[in-house]
């Protein structure tokens, strides 16, 4: 893959940078916060993003996309990641290229998307991530429903695996939640290490199309995930790079109202 930016890539970067500067001022963020809008995002802003073609940037033009390459998606992700609108970049990027492109190009494969934030946090000191998650299944309820999920990714260091939490979407009676290793260098290879299901006392997935709240605690190699203030699982994560990501598989997933709290406990003598 050629990583040199073309004139088209530079124009995209400039356009996205100008868009973020003009549309995500602190004043607008506060206005959205104070509006009390339950959606948690600006519909007008979303329509502008769609008009620019960013919700399907690498989809072929014959399917309504922009027909650009993977590097264009990376350029867009970098610039949108500078936005102060919680969940804005995540919503745009999970919505578009990796999900649709794999389905159209490889009919037998599952549609997957992973978006990793640019910022690196000190997970040894601790981090709390909270927000809202909504996942709508893209599969036939009678076929491949087990592959429909959304979740959170903790990137590993170097070429090592990261840690993923995958929450299946569907009927609470049947769905499960998985925690395990995830390698992105081998096209999304997930190895489940722990499973919670219907016989467990903890949360086991997400309701289809319902908006849930979530809170993830991470510190010193251990983590706890809560969904709707109920414990999903306590587990460990692998040597982290400090970057956090969000996952969608066979679902249209939306992560919104994201907040990040870095812990700062005083050292104990």
Image (cartoon, rainbow, N blue to C red):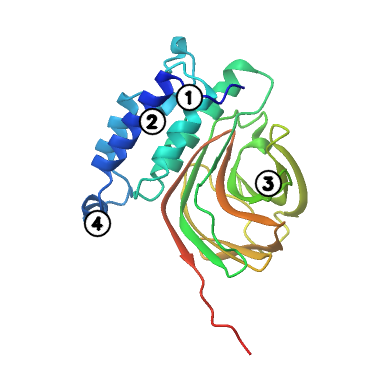
Marks 1/2 in contact by CB < 8 Å: the verdict is yes
Which mark is in front, 1 or 2? 1
Which of marks 2 and 3 precedes in the sequence? 2
Question: Looking at this rendering, what residue extends furthest in the bottom direction?
Answer: 269
Viewer-proximal residue, 185 or 222? 185
The 10 Å Cα crowd at callout 4, few under 14, some 14 to 19, many 20 or more, is few
Disc 3 target residue: 174
What residue lies at 58% left-to-right and 21% top-to-bottom?
2
Where is residue 68? Give x, y as percent. Answer: 47, 19
Residue 144 horizontal side relative to residue 131, left or right: right
Q: Which residue is mark 2?
A: 13
Kindly identify the residue that appears in the image at 57 percent across and 63 percent down.
122
Q: Is residue 34 left or right of residue 173?
A: left
Provide the secondary structure element on which disc 2 rests.
helix
Mark with earlier residue (1, 2): 1
How far apart in space, not on screen, are marks 4 and 3 (Cα)? 41 Å
Badge 2 crowding class, 10 Å Cα cut-off, few under 14, some 14 to 19, many 20 or more, is many
Residue 223 rendering spot, x and y as whole percentages: 64, 64
Residue 5, disc: 1
């Amino acid at each position: 893959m050629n990583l040199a930016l073309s004139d088209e890539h530079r124009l995209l970067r400039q356009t996205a940078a100008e868009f973020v500067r003009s549309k995500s001022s602190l004043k607008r963020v506060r206005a959205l916060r104070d509006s009390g809008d339950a959606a948690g995002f600006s519909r007008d802003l979303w329509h502008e993003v769609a008009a620019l073609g960013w919700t399907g940037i690498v989809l072929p033009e014959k399917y309504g996309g922009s027909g650009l390459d993977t590097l264009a998606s990376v350029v867009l992700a970098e610039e949108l990641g500078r936005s102060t609108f919680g969940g804005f970049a995540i919503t745009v990027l999970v919505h578009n290229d990796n999900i649709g492109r794999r389905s159209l190009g490889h009919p037998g494969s599952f549609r997957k998307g992973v978006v990793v934030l640019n910022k690196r946090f000190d997970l040894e000191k601790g981090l709390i991530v909270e927000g809202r998650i909504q996942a709508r299944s893209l599969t036939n309820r009678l076929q491949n429903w087990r592959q429909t999920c959304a979740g959170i990714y903790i990137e590993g260091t170097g070429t090592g695996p990261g840690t993923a939490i995958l929450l299946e979407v569907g009927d609470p009676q049947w769905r499960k939640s998985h925690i395990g290793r995830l390698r992105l260098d081998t096209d999304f290879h997930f190895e489940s290490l722990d499973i919670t299901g219907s016989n467990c006392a903890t949360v086991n997935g997400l309701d289809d199309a319902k908006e849930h709240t979530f809170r993830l605690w991470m510190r010193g190699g251990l983590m706890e995930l809560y969904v709707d203030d109920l414990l999903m699982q306590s587990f460990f994560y692998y040597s982290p790079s400090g970057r956090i990501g969000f996952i969608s598989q066979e679902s249209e997933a939306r992560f919104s109202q994201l907040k990040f709290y870095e812990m700062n406990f005083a050292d104990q003598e």
